[in-house]
Image: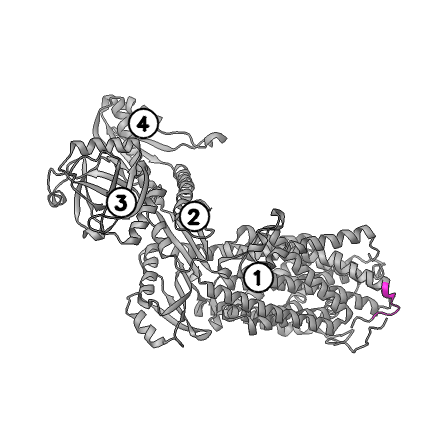
Amino acid sequence: MLYISKWKATAILLTACIVCLFAVPNFFPESMVKRWPEWAQRHIVLGLDLQGGSHILLEVDANDVRRQKLLALQDDVRRVLREARVGLTSAPVIRGNAVEVRIRENDFQQGLAKLRELSQPLGGFLGTTGQRSLDVENVGGGLVRLTPTDPALLERIRQVVDQSVEIIGKRVNQLGLVEPSIQRQGNDRILVQVPGLGDPQQLLDILGKTAKLTFRLVDTSMPAEQALQGRPPPDSEIVYGSKAENKQPYLLEKRVIVSGEELTDAQPAFDQRSGEPVVNFKFNTSGARKFAQVTQENVGRPFAIVLDEEVISAPVIREPILGGSGQISGNFTVESANNLAILLRAGALPAKLTVIEQRVVGAGLGQDSIEKGQLASYFGAALVVVFMIATYGLFGVFASIAVAVNVGMIFGVLSLLNATLTLPGIIGIVLTIGIAVDSNVLIYERIREEVRTGRTPITAIDAGFTRALATILDSNITTFIAAAVLFFFGSGPVRGFAVTLGIGIITTVFTAFTLTRLIVAWWIRWARPRQLVIS
Amino acid sequence: MRLYPSIPLLRIVPDDTKFDFMRFRRISFPMSAALSILAILLYFFHGLNFGIDFVGGTLIEIQSKSGPADLAKLRTTLGGLGLGDVQLQQFGSPNDVLIRVAQQPGGEQAQQAAIAKVRQALGNEVDYRRVEVVGPRVSSELLAKSTIGLGLAIFAILIYLWFRFEWQFSLGAMIANVHDLVLTIGYMSLTQIDFDLSSIAALLTILGYSLNDTVVIYDRIREMLRRYKRMSMPDLLNISVNSTLSRSIITHVTVTLALLALLLFGGHAIHSFVATMIFGVVLVGTYTSVFIAAPILIYLGVGTTRMESEQPAERQSARR
């Protein structure tokens, strides 16, 4: 147990040194580390709770996704049956979570077959799972009910999250924030983290909007008030104005002339005559052509610019707009014009997102936490070192060295992993330090016991190490299992705790088995003690 | 070998103590049972002071830019916003105030609206140190996930100890750990310390230390069981606990020193966390490993089969 070959000793020291060295970049300013070679740049990232910043968790609105899916399904049913020339007793309607359609008796079998074709197998290129996108049910009496299945809905939500991550990325980047991170979380969530952002109001404004832009003609066949009381024409609907427009109702055609997808650019600007903030936009070629055609045919009629089912403005077409560019005005402030331009450039989100969690830490608080944490750790470390040396003398010094190397290695591994260090993570490290001290105490106490049974120093140390290490292994494996379970089943902060604890346990076992033994072995060879005094 | 310069070293526990710890089980078991029941009653009837992490709502920590914060004025300003229950609390220095706004009816968006209102009302007179809004869905998930994680961790440990020792040890360790957690939760209920995610971390840490202690003592008991085949269980447990006593005390003094440093200098943010830790690790953990985890093995029937198998090799493993 105490004989350690030169090769082994070198390997132990090299491992400890190299792992500790990985922690070095953390002690230098970032600007300096950037000039180092790539492999040496890995460092610990401070969590938002320590460096300050905004953490915003968004969730895809499943109801919105379902509604969109039903609307699309309704269109599909209508189209498929029309193409197959199937006669209907009543048009497809959305009822609850399904689309229902009543087919004429003599066309029923053909219609049902066509509708069944709408249901696609799910599972993409990795092979089918046996699930289909739709449940097509023959209710009887010519009624067919089509229900999108839950797996289909989940798959759609997944797609929505993927698309949203990209669009949010574009939006956030335009705000000029430093190192924002946008990640998917679970099936239906997106986590946006922006270090250093103390007031996330503008960010929230930009994240909360779907930004679906459409240009539509105003239906002038009847006043909006009349349509509100009676029944609007079948191809038109009531859309309300924005707050700036006093929530005034408009009767708009359902047909969309051009939508936001056909924009190539949008910039905030000031109107040349009134000086008001406006947003200038440009269409792509097909958008420009469509817009030109419609404005040519409808000079003198009003059209509406609709954003997220709200009319921003409804100007009258004075002359055909042929150049493919235009201007949106609508009581904007400089900021809201700027926001709208960003939203239009980045594109619309495929579904509504809701903020379900928001945590903002000011830079001052983070700085305070770090400073106080540092002061407390220095003081705690000093107390522990003094106590260990007072109790164990020279062996206390050995213990302090071993624990210090242990902490160095924890930081080294965390840097190597580019891990994020949060407050719970620090707590995990503190717990590990306690366990590391304990492993040294276990070894020395065991050696003392063996000395008392009358063994010579070398055999006592040998036996002490052998027995104590078995105990250390047992207790650390148990704690490691707890850390592993917490890592896989815990959420955010608990995971941060589990990571540092797990890493700390591995380094603790490593130092106890190798470094502490090596130090003691060297000391014995150097001092050749005939009598052992540990305490 | 003499250490140079030769100084007398601190000795906390004398060598070869022979305390009869097992005798106390007639006091410690009823006491622990009574305290555990009390803790559970406290939990159900007094409840925990759940923070916004688990019940949702808004928490804002502000720092007044001009001298000490005027709580009364803040109270009238914020009370007039129609946000329901608004709690104010001095937090650390007199300039710092913690504002808690109850969960707003109307789902996730209503919480966002509430915070905008508060920001508008307070304007630029204060610095926002921390703003947290946790919606109803996230908070219930956090609670469920934390509880499941804690339960699974205990279960996994149970399985491992079962393989590594015998089932009695694994059951004993679990009883000891759950006992520690239950008493700590009782303490949190009694003191009404904020129960948030950092409290979960505190519970986990207490679990970790408690486990570590229990395993160290069990390891020694197992070793003694192999060595002394005919010794009565209480005597054997006493020897085991006495021989690890020095280690237990030195380790706990060290941990306590580190925790005291955190308590004194760690700042307000981790104050309740450290207080919980000191209660759990120092007061309960130490007591449990000696007075509960070890003697419970007598009741769980450890070592009964050993007495029956009469083997002549009595001190067969005294020497390695």
Asked if disc 4 and disc 2 are in contact, CB closer than 8 Å, the reply is: no
Q: Secondary structure at mark 1?
A: helix
Residue lying at 13% horizontally and 37% vertically, measured from the top left? A300
C-alpha separation, residue under disc 2 versus residue under disc 1: 26 Å
Asked whether residue A459 appears in the rendered view, the answer is: no
Q: Quadrant of residue A139?
A: top left
* Residue A338: image location, x then y, percent: 32, 50
Query: In screen coordinates, is B318 left or right of A436?
Result: right
**From what the image shows, is residue B185 above or below residue A168?**
below
Label 4 vs 3, first from the N-terminus: 4
Q: Amino acid at mark 3?
A: Leu
**Chain of the residue that carries numbered disc 3 in the rendered image:** A
Q: Single out the mark in the foreground, 4 or 3.
A: 3
Label 4 vs 2, first from the N-terminus: 4
Specify the segment rendered in magenta: A526-532
Q: Which residue is mark 4?
A: A115
Could you say which disc has been placed on residue A190 in the image?
Answer: 2
Q: Amino acid at mark 4?
A: Leu
Query: In screen coordinates, is B263 left or right of B10?
Result: left
Which class describes the residues within 10 Å of circle 1: few (<14), some (14-19), or many (20+)?
some
Q: Which residue is mark 1?
A: A426
* Residue A85: image location, x then y, percent: 24, 21
Query: In screen coordinates, is B94 left or right of A270?
Result: right
Q: Do the residues marked 1 and 3 share a common chain? A: yes
Asked if disc 2 and disc 3 are in contact, CB closer than 8 Å, the reply is: no
Label 2 vs 1, first from the N-terminus: 2
Q: Secondary structure at mark 3?
A: strand
Q: Which residue is mark 3?
A: A307
Q: Quadrant of residue A475?
A: bottom right
